[in-house]
Amino acid sequence: MEFKNLIYEQENGLGIITLNRPKAFNALNEDLTFELGELASVLNGNQDLRVLIITGGSRVFAAGADIIGMMNASVMDAYRQVVVGHRVFDRLENLQFPTIAAINGPCLGGGCELSMCCDFRIAGEGAVFGLPEVSLGIIPGCGGTQRLAKLIGQARAKEMIYLCDTIKASKALEYGLVNKVVADELVMEEAKAFAVRLIQKPGVALRFAKEAVNCGVQYDFSSGKGMELSRFSMAFSTEDQKEGMKAFAEKRKAQYKNK
């Protein structure tokens, strides 16, 4: 598939989405958001894809939404836009394989919300994070109020959202918003190395683990436990479970088939 606002590459089980609106600092307009949703739907059925990295390149992840395009929106226009945004971001969050956001530079507003849809966030030392929507007379509209609070806690989330504070990568690491901070020039290298470690794991087990964790976070503890019970049991129907336990007993490295 060809896209105007995205670049997609895939090799050896690793897919990389690069946001491609450099003149607009990768601001998330309707077209880019729509393309993300279309690509996510296609990739979710890609049996050769094991891990996905989302990046904005070496200078900026995404500097928010397209404010100019939103200025004169009506209530119904705004509602329709965020309904699409929720649908796309939920789709990204629930992809059947692990996802990593590789973040350089500004990661603000819709960009920050996009990064929080990923399972992991690896940031450069110069990255900055924030949800500045309140300063524009609105609020985060693509799940940011919910995902941020669950990631870093209500008190810190409210401080960032209410005051429109931006935080540096080091503070984001302290808060638990990112998993790792590295030198700016090493972000993609680190993200790819992390992806390789994930690719070496049995893919079905990773999918089951993701479904269980996401269920508990998105719904409640009881639902999460129910999903865990289901996926734990289902894992015993896979070839990889047999191989993994046999390899453990034989003290050798497992050879997974992702089946």
Image: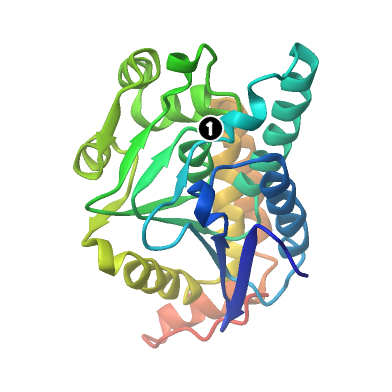
Position of 5 compared to 16: left or right?
right
Q: Where is the C terminus found, in terms of image quarters?
A: bottom right
Identify which amino acid the numbered label 1 is placed on. Val
Q: Nearer the viewer, residue 191 or 235?
A: 191
Q: Is residue 257 above or below residue 118?
A: below
What residue would you read off at disc 1?
217
Position of 123 compared to 213: left or right?
left
Q: How many marks?
A: 1
Q: Nearer the viewer, residue 186 or 22?
A: 22
Residue at image position (45%, 38%) is 112
* Rendered location of residue 123, percent (x, y): 32, 53
Residue at image position (53%, 42%) is 114
Q: Is residue 191 above or below residue 146?
A: below
Q: Is residue 137 above or below residue 119?
A: above
Judged from the image, the secondary structure of the residue bearing numbered disc 1 is helix
* Rendered location of residue 248, percent (x, y): 41, 78
